[in-house]
Image (tube, helix red, strand yellow):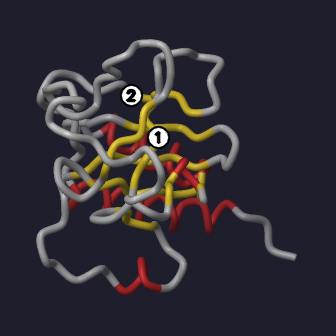
């Protein structure tokens, strides 16, 4: 079963189990070892993904760029109109209250995410491709940008 941002519910789906002999080594876990199609990557070990609706994600992305925050990889899922920011994996910190009640969704241990191929016509593409070993956006800066962007978008929304 696949959800927004190409997330797959079970980590034990048929064909997902790899062995050391069949799993090629990877630098960051973000490179497509085959080069011809998207690949699934497990979240929660090397990175987590914070997924938001496209308008909020684009507004937050603009704020992060304006502030010269070291920006990590950012995924755009065209089908679901969701943006996923790759962030450091959460280590036993509680989820913020907003995340528990319909806010941005953090995807971590036990989930999978579809990584883009680099094909600009694919359903999942990079808004910001991973660069070397610095492919994660600092979580604190991202949360601050998302809060500010949400406030700005709420103020711009017409009242009826």
The residue positioned 22% from the left and 22% from the top of the image is 131
Q: Secondary structure at mark 2?
A: strand
Depth check, mark 1 against mark 2: the one in front is 1
Vertical arrangement, residue 160 with respect to residue 80, above or below: below
Furthest residue in direction right, as rendered: 160
Instruction: Tell me, for residue 114, which label it has, or none.
Output: 1
Q: Position of residue 84 (x, y in %)?
A: 44, 48
Pick the front one: 54 or 2 = 2
Residue 59 at what x, y percent from top left? 51, 47
Up/down of 7 relative to 64, above or below? below
Residue 7 is tagged as none
Q: Secondary structure at mark 1?
A: strand
Q: Tag count in the figure? A: 2
The 10 Å Cα crowd at callout 2, few under 14, some 14 to 19, many 20 or more, is some
The residue that appears at 52% across and 28% down in the rendered structure is 125
Please report the residue visible at 38 percent of the width from the left and 59 percent of the height from the top: 11
Q: Is residue 9 above or below residue 19?
A: below
Which quarter shows the N terminus?
bottom right
Instruction: Look at the picture and state if 89 lies above or below 42.
Output: below
Q: 13 and 94: which one is in front?
A: 13
In the picture provided, is 16 more to the left or to the right than 70?
Answer: right
Q: Residue at label 2?
A: 128
Between disc 1 and disc 2, whose residue precedes?
A: 1
Q: Quadrant of the C terminus?
A: bottom right
Quick one: label 1, few (<14), some, or many (20+) residues within 10 Å?
many
Q: CA distance from mark 1 to mark 2?
A: 15 Å
The reply, left or right, for residue 24 in relation to residue 150 is left
Decide which of 156, 29 is in the foreground and name it: 29
Q: Position of residue 34 (x, y in %)?
A: 38, 16
Q: Position of residue 2 (x, y in %)?
A: 59, 55
Q: Is residue 140 left or right of residue 13?
A: left
């Amino acid at each position: 079963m696949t959800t927004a941002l190409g997330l797959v519910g079970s980590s034990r789906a048929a064909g997902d189990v790899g062995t050391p002999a069949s799993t090629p080594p990877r630098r960051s876990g973000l490179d497509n070892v085959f080069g011809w199609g998207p690949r699934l990557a497990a979240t929660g070990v090397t990175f987590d993904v914070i997924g938001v609706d496209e308008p909020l994600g684009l507004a937050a992305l603009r704020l992060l760029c304006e502030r010269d925050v070291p920006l990590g990889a950012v995924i755009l899922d065209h089908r679901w109109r969701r943006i996923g920011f790759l962030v450091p994996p959460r280590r036993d910190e509680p989820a913020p209250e907003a995340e528990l009640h319909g806010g941005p969704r953090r995807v971590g241990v036990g989930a999978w995410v579809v990584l883009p191929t680099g094909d600009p016509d694919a359903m999942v593409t990079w808004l910001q491709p991973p660069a070397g070993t610095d492919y994660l956006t600092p979580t604190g800066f991202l949360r601050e940008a998302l809060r500010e962007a949400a406030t700005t978008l709420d103020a711009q929304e017409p009242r009826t």
